[in-house]
Amino acid sequence: MSARPRIRVMFVDDHPMLRAGLAATLLAEDDMEIAAEASDGAEAIQMYQQHRPDIVLMDLRLPRLGGVEAIRAIRDADAKARIIVLTTYDGEEDIYRALDAGARAYLLKDMLRRELIDAIRAVHSGQTYLSPTVASRLASRVHREELSSRELEILGLVARGGSNKEVAARLGLAEGTVRIHMSNIFEKLGVHDRTEAAMEALKRGILHLD
């Protein structure tokens, strides 16, 4: 009887040491092999087209093109692509954006080796995979009101140290308009001041300052 085909896995991460660790983990499994590696989102799209792996392990924080954008591009080109996010980003908005782009699983880099292997096999068989922690964070998003694109723009500038006056000048708005937007932001995030708003947005993955 012939051996069953191995699951061909591609890694996308800009840290060579992490890619080496992932390779060692997967090569210890009889049913897995390394199809390709990429160090940024743009390269991931190219390598996917070239190698057509069964599974892609995708970080979200990547140079040139971010992970969510790369997931969306790969899925637009191949609706059957099976992508697992493997990242340090644990905010509910990060999780939502990745799944909305087409990821089939979301893992944090501090997960156990066994969880990674289980997730790869589950997604390869057509299932989705969310750990209880990730599922809980995603569920908490359902009852929260989203920030508008203008509110996100203003909050991003505020989080980088901009005053209401500076933000207004940057965006061509009246200072009073910025104050109104900030009041709405406070209410939606359940906070009381600018510092709390920035910290809550970073915690949830609404903003990233890097």
Image (tube, rainbow, N blue to C red):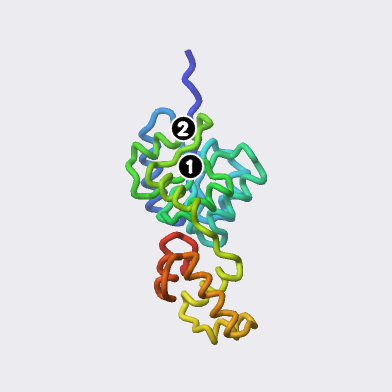
- Above-or-below relation of 166 to 74: below
Q: Are marks 1 and 2 in contact (CB under 8 Å)?
A: yes
Residue 119: image tag: none
Between 194 and 15, the residue placed more toward the observer is: 194
Q: Residue 174: x and y, percent? A: 62, 84
Q: Residue 63: x and y, percent? A: 52, 61
Count residues near mark 1 (Cα–Cα under 10 Å), then give few for <14, some for 14-19, many for 20+: many
Instruction: Name the quadrant containing residue 54.
Output: top right
Q: Residue 191: x and y, percent? A: 42, 69
Q: Could you tell me which secondary element the residue under label 2 belongs to?
A: helix
Q: Which residue is mark 1?
A: 105
- Above-or-below relation of 64 to 138: below
Give me the residue at 40% from left, 55% from top. 88
Amino acid found under the numbered disc labelled 2: Ala
Give me the residue at 50% from left, 58% from top. 62
Q: CA distance from mark 1 to mark 2?
A: 9 Å
Q: Is residue 30 left or right of residue 164?
A: left
Give me the residue at 41% from left, 73% from top. 192
Q: Which residue is mark 2?
A: 122
Q: Could you tell me which secondary element the residue under label 1 belongs to?
A: strand
Give me the residue at 44% from left, 51% from top. 140
Between 19 and 108, the residue placed more toward the observer is: 108
Q: Residue 25: x and y, percent? A: 36, 39
Instruction: Name the quadrant containing residue 91.
Output: bottom left
Q: Is residue 153 left or right of residue 195?
A: right
- Above-or-below relation of 193 to 1: below
Instruction: Name the quadrant containing residue 69.
Output: bottom right
- Above-or-below relation of 65 to 25: below
Q: Earlier in the sequence, mark 1 or mark 2?
A: 1
Amino acid found under the numbered disc labelled 1: Ala
